């Protein structure tokens, strides 16, 4: 039996565990706004998000290829599997810590930070051009787009429905939020499940089980099921932060924020094939919508705490992953 197979099996299990934590950590991204505006009940919203995450995860593998082959040079052998394992440990630890604290940090950037930290600890090559072009620039640009588009879309809705009956408009937008919540979850599946697919495929390539970076069908299905199950498990701690603590949205505002965020995620996944944080995009979209009332309506103190979590995610996950690599290498080596 190939001596790398047991290690590969452990990594696949850990990767799917990360995918599961990604689901319950980021479930709030798709449903918090709809729940806070009473468009959906929490249980119905979670079920809808779980199904649409599954569908989104099955659509394409472009982001998986970017994460698995564009962040670090694909490693080889036992040491390479240690790098992948340590990257997953760093991402999972950071996910659990921020979930416990109720901070909507980025699972995507935790995983990418884990890859970079583990690679640096192993003195392995990092593709810094890929990190800059496919991670850092989209990390900065996508929240700005979310904020600006959220602001403009909400202004457009306010103008278009300025003479409408308020009660009927609220009811209509609650129905519309069912569709925007579903699209939001679809975009989340297209983005976040693919990152786990990329990691598992990288591990298969590292172990010599595949010759080229092509995501096997069973990996796509396994990652889709794991993130869907995690989503259904829920993320109520983070839901409270996104749904109420930043600003209390109207149904129209919720629809605007979710529509903008899902548009950004689907576009970046299909057109640009770059990983973006669903957390970053939906949070700034909510801020943009809220700013149409007045800038003071947004609780910028809460928003500042969220931004701080974003800033420290990459280095924090990288640090944990580097430590995990050192420990793993010492034990296995």
Image: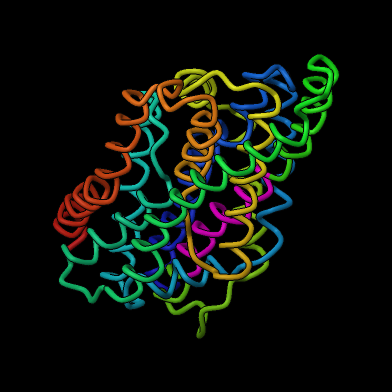
Looking at the image, which residue is at 38% across and 61% down? 7
Q: Quadrant of residue 129?
A: bottom left
Q: Residue furthest top?
A: 167
Give left or right: position of 206 versus 157: left
Residue 267 x, y percent position in the rendering = 62, 61
The stretch drawn in magenta includes residue 264:
no
Q: Is residue 211 above or below residue 38?
A: below
Q: For residue 229, say whether it is visible.
A: no
Camera-side residue of 76 and 61: 61
Looking at the image, which residue is at 59% across and 71% down? 215
Residue 229 x, y percent position in the rendering = 63, 37
Residue 275 x, y percent position in the rendering = 48, 60
Q: Is residue 281 above or below residue 5?
A: above
Give left or right: position of 28 versus 254: left
Q: Residue furthest bottom?
A: 211
Q: Quadrant of residue 87?
A: bottom left
Q: How many callouts does the rendering have?
A: 0
- Secondary structure mostly seen in magenta is helix
Q: Quadrant of residue 308?
A: top left
Q: Is residue 126 above or below residue 94?
A: below
The quarter in which the N terminus is drawn is bottom left
Range covered by the magenta-colored residues: 184-201
The stretch drawn in magenta includes residue 199:
yes
Residue 70 x, y percent position in the rendering = 40, 74
Looking at the image, which residue is at 37% across and 30% down? 303
Q: For residue 139, say whether it is visible.
A: yes
Give left or right: position of 21 versus 221: left
Camera-side residue of 16 and 267: 267
Camera-side residue of 246 and 166: 166
The quarter in which the C terminus is drawn is bottom left
């Amino acid at each position: 039996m190939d001596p790398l197979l047991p290690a590969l099996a452990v990594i696949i299990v850990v990767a799917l565990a990360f995918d599961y934590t990604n689901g319950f950590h980021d479930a709030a991204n798709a449903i918090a706004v709809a729940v806070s505006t009473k468009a959906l009940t929490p249980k119905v919203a979670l079920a809808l998000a779980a199904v649409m995450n599954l569908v989104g995860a099955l659509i394409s593998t472009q982001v998986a290829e970017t994460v698995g082959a564009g962040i670090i040079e694909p490693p080889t052998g036992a040491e390479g599997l240690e790098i992948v394992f340590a990257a997953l440990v760093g991402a999972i630890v950071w996910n659990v810590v921020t979930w416990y604290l109720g901070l909507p940090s980025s699972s995507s950037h935790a995983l990418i930070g884990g890859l970079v930290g583990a690679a640096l600890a192993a003195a392995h090559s990092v593709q810094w051009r890929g990190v800059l072009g496919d991670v850092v620039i989209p990390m900065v640009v996508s929240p700005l787009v979310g904020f600006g588009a959220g602001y403009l879309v909400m202004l457009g809705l306010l103008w278009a429905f300025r003479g409408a009956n308020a009660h009927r408009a609220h009811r209509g937008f609650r129905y519309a939020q069912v569709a925007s919540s579903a699209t939001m979850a679809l975009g989340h599946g297209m983005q976040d499940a693919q990152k786990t697919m990329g990691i598992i495929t990288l591990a298969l390539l590292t172990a010599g089980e595949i010759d080229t970076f092509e995501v096997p069908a069973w990996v796509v299905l396994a990652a889709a099921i794991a993130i869907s199950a995690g989503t259904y498990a829920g993320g109520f701690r983070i839901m409270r932060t996104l749904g109420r603590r930043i600003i209390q949205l109207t149904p129209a505002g919720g629809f605007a924020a979710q529509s903008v965020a899902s548009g950004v995620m689907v576009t970046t996944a299909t057109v640009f094939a770059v990983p973006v944080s669903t957390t970053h995009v939906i949070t700034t979209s909510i801020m943009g919508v809220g700013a149409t009332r007045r800038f003071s309506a947004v609780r910028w103190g809460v928003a500042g705490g969220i931004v701080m979590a974003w800033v420290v995610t990459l280095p924090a996950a990288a640090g944990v992953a580097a430590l995990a690599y050192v420990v793993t290498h010492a034990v296995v080596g």
